[in-house]
């Protein structure tokens, strides 16, 4: 039996080995946010002492009088000149930056007020993270479905019924949608795909590679909203509100692009597996397990039992019923989720964000003993503006902005997406558990609920420190200073948006070699890049779509991906001498092709001008 050659010389992996060594020496993500928070504290203190200032600006088109062919001004009906956008030598509208408000100065945290704020807001900085509730609630339902085996059975069923000819695209497509199932995609699909390929006479490592490319490389695609989408939503909205206080990002902000991306990743993975990877594997020789092509023993071990088949049927019927009920609630006139709505508190009030300064308490009125009056310039906030047990006496902060709703009005269904995700997976997961016997008591139900929460405990720990960093960044004003300074440079550079998109995808890819995890990287990048790109007309939703690409395509080769070791164990089942370098060289073609095709797809989408999700435009108006 032939063995895999030694492969390229060690120098061929020198760069990847260096990246791995450096990555292993980096602090854990939670500690990275501690370091970043410390950097913000130091920079804000230095900037405050040095008197740094940044003038907020707003891009505006330069307007000129319209003239006719003779050079005479074109007048409106009222006799005033008609104004049009001035064009440069390339025929594009000319923009200028105009001041917008008072200069921003950094606010030091190393003051009495700053230290008091850091300590008093520590809990709120964590619990107020917009992504926290989205992830937590979504994972209650998703985690239960995963615990009882619904996702694993569904992936096995789809793979088993797929004809040999279309096995690769189906495996990649399942993988691209596996992010909804948390870790199940990494643990179940790659070994299943390897066994399926072997059973139908194909190279098992090709199946492993196809599955891993879909699960990791297609992580940013998929047909279903996930807990990760909730995380991106919260941070994108907070970052967008640095520039536009009322901006709202929904959990479906990339839904159209995500669904289409799953198809793009499927075709890209199909081409790479069948035309590049598998032919190369066949030239290298057979697998080393002793198994022969057509061996179905592994498939029999993974075959669905009768109870699992019944469970899948009832789970899918339940899911269809849940989705049908929600569609009726949305589509039927007068139904609870039909038409526009405004989220309120249990007392009917709405949450309002307003920059204010809390004034001194009322003073005694010398002219009327026993009476009190407000100090000069103080004003009582309307009851609906401030939620407190006692009235607060506030004045608008100098340079403050108009009050804005914390939860914006919109279509009613858009306010209940997370509960919809919760029930869409919770109830089918329960149906599957009942049929298979994995759900027999209330203790089993509670354990299923706990399973999803256990899986995100590391995320919660990271989120605590991330919350401190994000809020320190906002308190000091460095977020707005960096946004306006960087945005002004981008406007002045006048780079085309397609070029900015490609550059940003590359920045995210480089970041993935230093900081693993979708949430961790986005927590660092969103407050910086989203406001900057809004200054040049890119919507937060478009920036998030580009981030998905950069975060996904490098997942299959970065040594910082903890799941690489799980995949390596499966690979070594078929190649005893395989190491991390072997796995990375196997997956590198997927990473390169996914980057080129997926980024090109985003550029084509931008050129077409299509919305990237429901109420999610590509462009942000800078006027």
Image (cartoon, helix red, strand yellow):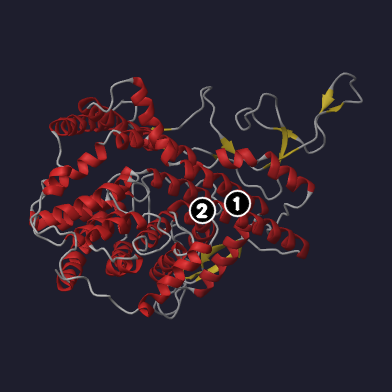
Q: Is residue 430 above or below residue 244?
A: above
Q: Residue at x 69, y 45 (%)?
A: 118
Observer-nearest residue: 198 or 168? Answer: 198
Q: Would you call the spot at circle 2 few (<14 residues within 10 Å), some (14-19), or many (20 or more)?
A: many
Q: Residue at x 15, y 38 (%)?
A: 304
Q: Evaluate whether residue 72 shows in this view.
A: yes
**Image position, residue 617 (x, y; %):** 38, 54
Identify the mark at residue 523; answer none if there is no mark.
2
Identify the mark at residue 596; answer none if there is no mark.
none
Q: Would you call the spot at circle 1 few (<14 residues within 10 Å), some (14-19), or many (20 or more)?
A: many
- Residue extending furthest top? 370
Q: Evaluate whether residue 93 shows in this view.
A: no
**Helix, strand or loop at disc 1?**
helix
| Left or right relative to 559: residue 376 | right
**Image position, residue 478 (x, y; %):** 64, 58
Q: Is residue 120 above or below residue 244?
A: above
Instruction: Find residue 266 and report its image quarter.
Output: bottom left
| Left or right relative to 333: residue 36 | right
Observer-nearest residue: 462 or 10? Answer: 10
| Left or right relative to 287: residue 419 | right
Instruction: Find residue 217 and report its image quarter.
Output: bottom left
Q: Residue at x 63, y 32 (%)?
A: 386
Mark 1–mark 2 CB contact (< 8 Å): yes
**Image position, residue 385 (x, y; %):** 61, 32
Q: How far apart are the alpha carbons under marks 1 and 2?
A: 9 Å
| Residue bearing the label numbered 1 | 469
**Image position, residue 394 (x, y; %):** 72, 36
Count numbered badges in the picture.
Answer: 2
Counting residues from the start of the chain, the first of labels 1 and 2 encountered is 1
**Helix, strand or loop at disc 2?**
helix
């Amino acid at each position: 039996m032939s063995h895999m050659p030694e492969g390229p010389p060690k120098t061929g992996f020198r760069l990847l080995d260096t990246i791995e060594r450096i990555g292993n020496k980096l602090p854990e993500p939670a500690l990275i946010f501690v370091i970043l928070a410390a950097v913000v504290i130091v920079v804000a203190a230095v900037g405050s002492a040095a008197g740094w200032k940044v003038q907020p600006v707003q891009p505006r088109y330069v307007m000129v009088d319209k003239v006719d062919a003779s050079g005479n001004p074109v007048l409106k009906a009222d006799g005033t000149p008609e104004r049009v956008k001035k064009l440069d030598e390339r025929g594009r509208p000319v923009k200028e930056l105009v001041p917008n408000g008072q200069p921003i100065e950094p606010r030091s945290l190393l003051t009495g007020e700053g230290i008091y704020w850091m300590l008093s807001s520590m809990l709120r900085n964590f619990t107020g993270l917009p992504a926290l509730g989205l992830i937590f609630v979504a994972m209650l339902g998703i985690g239960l479905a995963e615990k009882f085996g619904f996702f694993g059975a569904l992936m096995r069923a789809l793979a088993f019924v797929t004809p040999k000819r279309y096995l690769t695209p189906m495996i990649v497509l399942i993988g691209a949608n596996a992010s909804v199932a948390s870790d199940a995609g990494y643990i179940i699909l790659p070994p299943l795909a390897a066994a399926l390929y072997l059973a139908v006479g194909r190279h098992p490592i090709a199946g492993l590679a196809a599955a891993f490319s879909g699960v990791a490389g297609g992580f940013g695609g998929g047909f279903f909203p996930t807990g990760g989408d909730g995380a991106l939503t919260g941070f994108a909205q907070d970052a967008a509100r640095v520039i536009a206080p009322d901006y709202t990002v929904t959990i479906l902000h990339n839904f159209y692009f995500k669904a289409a991306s799953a198809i793009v990743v499927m075709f890209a993975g199909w081409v790479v597996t069948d035309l590049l990877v598998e032919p190369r594997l066949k030239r290298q020789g057979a697998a080393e397990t002793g198994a022969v092509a057509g061996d179905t023993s592994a498939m029999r071990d993974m075959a669905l039992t009768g109870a699992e088949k019944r469970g899948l049927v009832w789970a899918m019927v339940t899911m269809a019923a849940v989705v049908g009920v929600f569609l009726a609630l949305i589509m039927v006139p007068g139904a609870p989720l039909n038409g526009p709505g405004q989220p309120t508190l249990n007392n009917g009030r709405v949450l309002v964000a307003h920059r204010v300064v809390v004034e001194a308490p009322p003073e005694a009125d010398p002219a009327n003993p026993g009476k009190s009056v407000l100090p000069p310039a103080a004003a009582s906030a309307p009851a609906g503006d401030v939620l407190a047990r006692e009235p607060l006496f506030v004045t608008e902060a100098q340079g403050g902005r108009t009050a804005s709703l914390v939860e914006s009005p919109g279509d009613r269904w858009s306010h209940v997406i997370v509960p919809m995700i919760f029930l869409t997976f919770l109830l089918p997961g329960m149906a599957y558990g009942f049929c298979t016997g994995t759900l027999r008591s209330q203790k089993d139900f509670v354990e299923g609920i706990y399973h999803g929460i256990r899986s995100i405990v590391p995320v919660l720990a990271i989120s605590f420190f991330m919350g401190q960093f994000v809020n320190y960044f906002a308190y000091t004003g460095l977020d707005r200073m960096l946004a306006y300074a960087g945005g002004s440079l981008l406007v002045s550079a006048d780079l085309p948006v397609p070029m900015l998109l490609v550059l940003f995808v590359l920045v995210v890819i480089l970041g993935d070699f230093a900081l693993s995890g979708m949430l961790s990287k986005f927590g660092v990048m969103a407050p910086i890049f989203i406001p900057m790109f809004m200054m040049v007309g890119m919507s937060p939703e478009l920036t998030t779509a580009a981030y998905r690409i950069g975060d996904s395509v490098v997942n299959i080769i970065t040594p910082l991906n903890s799941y690489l070791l799980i995949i390596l164990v499966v690979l070594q089942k078929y190649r005893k001498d395989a190491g991390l370098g072997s796995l990375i060289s196997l997956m590198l073609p997927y990473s390169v092709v996914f980057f080129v095709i997926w980024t090109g797809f985003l550029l084509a989408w931008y050129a077409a001008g299509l919305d990237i999700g429901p109420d999610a435009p590509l462009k942000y108006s800078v006027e």
